[in-house]
Amino acid sequence: MRRPSRPIATVVLSVATLASCQSDSARESVADASAQVAIAAAAISGQDAPLANEVKNASYMGFDTGTYPGDEAMRAWRTGNSPYKWTGYYLPSPCHQDEGWSGKRDTLTAMGYGLAVLYVGQQTWGRKPGAPHMVRVSVPKKVATYVGKGRHRHRVTKTVMKTVLRKAPPPRADATCNADFVGGARGMRDGVDAALRTAREGFPRGTTVFLDIERMDVIHQSMRDYYAAWVRAVLDDGRYVPGIYVHTDNANTVYDDVKAVYTSVGLEGEPPFWVAKSRGFDTTKHPTEMGHTFAAIWQGILDVKQTWNGHKIPIDVNVASLPSPSSVVGEIAAGFRAGE
């Protein structure tokens, strides 16, 4: 008589139980192995493998904050009961000049952090790039008033500051961030800069660099030219994988444009996308459950302050499909790693 096959759940549970006793990296390897075992068992037995899908679609919590919190705070947030496996890593860039994260790659990886590398490029700031626009400025104005009573009443003139609208001047010669810079030429320039800065921080070939594009009511053609040129410049550099941080409202359009650039150079894999969407966010969900199947990271809670192990940091909360979202993985990154 043929003996009944061992339930798939038992196979996965046995491997997953082993994972609970290991380090973070060991747990990730064992979890992936458990998924593969379950998938193989399902193929042999004809059973479904829901636990395999659950393990295979694991998500990893991370946070990002623009200003480096300091080594002590970062170490505290990676110990004890903190849930965060990775952090955003801000490169000095046109619209984020702060250099607090610079030189911290080795320090953070030694603490056990995964990293998501960010480059904050040009933004439209709610207007059409290059179009005349008005700005609020404060100007002095003389105002006359009368004080006193009777024969002591007299006129007093004083200067007050008044806010008025005036035509915006052109960007200053030393400006690095301005909506009027948005366009294809600047995209190429900033893409080259992003690759150079990523290399300067010591990131290996195949690392993903995310271009930060903030939410737009209208995606003007000049912005589409900008991020497409940025992606192409990073690809032409040949060392790093260009990814995009984008709001859910703009994600589909930006994805289609970036995917077209990837296809134009013969890359068939998915460009990495970090998508911001508050509605429906759950730290137990996988990024692809947000409604964009191309999402590698889901940012769902913005501008909150949390305290872990005695250190408070203002953060945005994310979940990612990888414990280190910029790490060298996948078919696209493999080509960069090999220097192809």
Image (cartoon, rainbow, N blue to C red):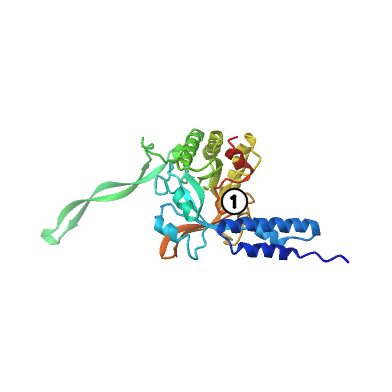
Quadrant where the C terminus sits is top right
Q: Is residue 302 left or right of residue 8?
A: left
Instruction: Please tell me in which quadrant of the rendered image residue 147 appears.
Output: bottom left
Q: Depth check: 315 or 145 in front? A: 315
Q: Residue at x 47, y 49 (%)?
A: 89
Number of residues whose C-alpha sits closer than 10 Å to that of mark 1, classed few (under 14), some (14–19) or many (20 or more)? many
Q: Depth check: 162 or 39 in front? A: 39
Above-or-below relation of 233 to 52: above
Q: Is residue 309 left or right of residue 263?
A: left
Q: Residue at x 32, y 49 (%)?
A: 163
Q: Amino acid at mark 1?
A: Ala
Q: Position of residue 96 (x, y in %)?
A: 42, 46
Q: Depth check: 54 or 213 in front? A: 54
Q: Position of residue 321 (x, y in %)?
A: 60, 54
Asked whether the viewer can see residue 131, the reply is: no
Q: Depth check: 85 or 110 in front? A: 110
Above-or-below relation of 8 to 223: below
Above-or-below relation of 183 to 251: above
Q: Position of residue 48 (x, y in %)?
A: 76, 60
Above-or-below relation of 224 to 35: above
Asked whether the viewer can see residue 49, the reply is: yes
| Extreme residue toward the left, this view | 151
The kind of secondary structure element at disc 1 is strand
Check disc 1 and report the residue beneath it: 296
Q: Residue at x 55, y 47 (%)?
A: 327
Quadrant where the N terminus sits is bottom right
Q: Position of residue 172 (x, y in %)?
A: 36, 37
Q: Is residue 176 left or right of residue 83?
A: left
Instruction: Please tell me in which quadrant of the rendered image residue 50 appears.
Output: bottom right
